[in-house]
Image: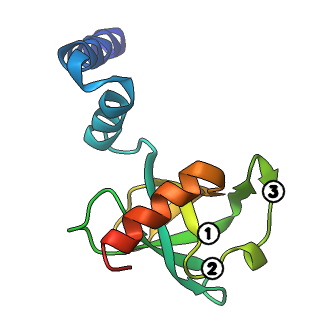
Amino acid sequence: MKTRVKVLGAAVLVAVLGGVGCAGTKEAARDVEAAVPGLSQKREGVVTDVDKDAYRIAVKAVDDPSAPEAWFVLTPDTKLERDGQLVTWDDLDEGTPVRVSFEPATGPEKAHKVEILTGNKADEVKQKAEHLGG
């Protein structure tokens, strides 16, 4: 029975990925991640609040203007990085462009990784945020 479920699950993923060939691989991966509970998702945006006492940050997504800001809980296992190097809470401030990898949850999302964006990607996220009024 377990083998049948695994084969069926793999077939569904192949069908989903195969059916969105025009969307591109990044978009297809996001669609699959969003559709399957328990898989990590990503959000790019700008930090709007830092609560160091509760170990959480608020991020306003720049790709979905209608989405409210989301709170992410950072645990001791959460990686904070900039250009592949570990950083600390002191590097997270309001207005910092970030990419958060998280697992969806009721209430604040549990962040696995917070990447502080730099260079062109940071500029792109900041420009999108400015157009949103952030």
Q: Secondary structure at mark 1?
A: strand
Q: Which residue is mark 1?
A: 74
**Looking at the image, which residue sits at the far bottom?**
53
> Label 3 to label 2, Cα distance in Å?
17 Å
Q: Position of residue 69 (x, y in %)?
A: 36, 75
The residue lying at 77 percent from left, 79 percent from top is 90
Q: Which residue is mark 3?
A: 86
Judging depth in this view, the residue of 134 and 12 nearest the camera is: 134
**Number of the front mark, 3 or 1:** 3
Badge 1 crowding class, 10 Å Cα cut-off, few under 14, some 14 to 19, many 20 or more, is many
The residue lying at 63 percent from left, 79 percent from top is 55
> Label 1 to label 2, Cα distance in Å?
5 Å
The residue type indicated by label 1 comes to Leu
- Residue 106 visible in the picture: yes
Judging depth in this view, the residue of 72 and 69 nearest the camera is: 69
Badge 2 crowding class, 10 Å Cα cut-off, few under 14, some 14 to 19, many 20 or more, is few
Residue 110: which disc? none
The residue type indicated by label 2 comes to Tyr
- Which coloring applies here? rainbow
The residue lying at 40 percent from left, 69 percent from top is 129
The residue type indicated by label 3 comes to Leu
Residue 55: which disc? 2
Q: Position of residue 88 (x, y in %)?
A: 79, 70
Compared across the picture, whether 9 is left or right of 102 comes to left
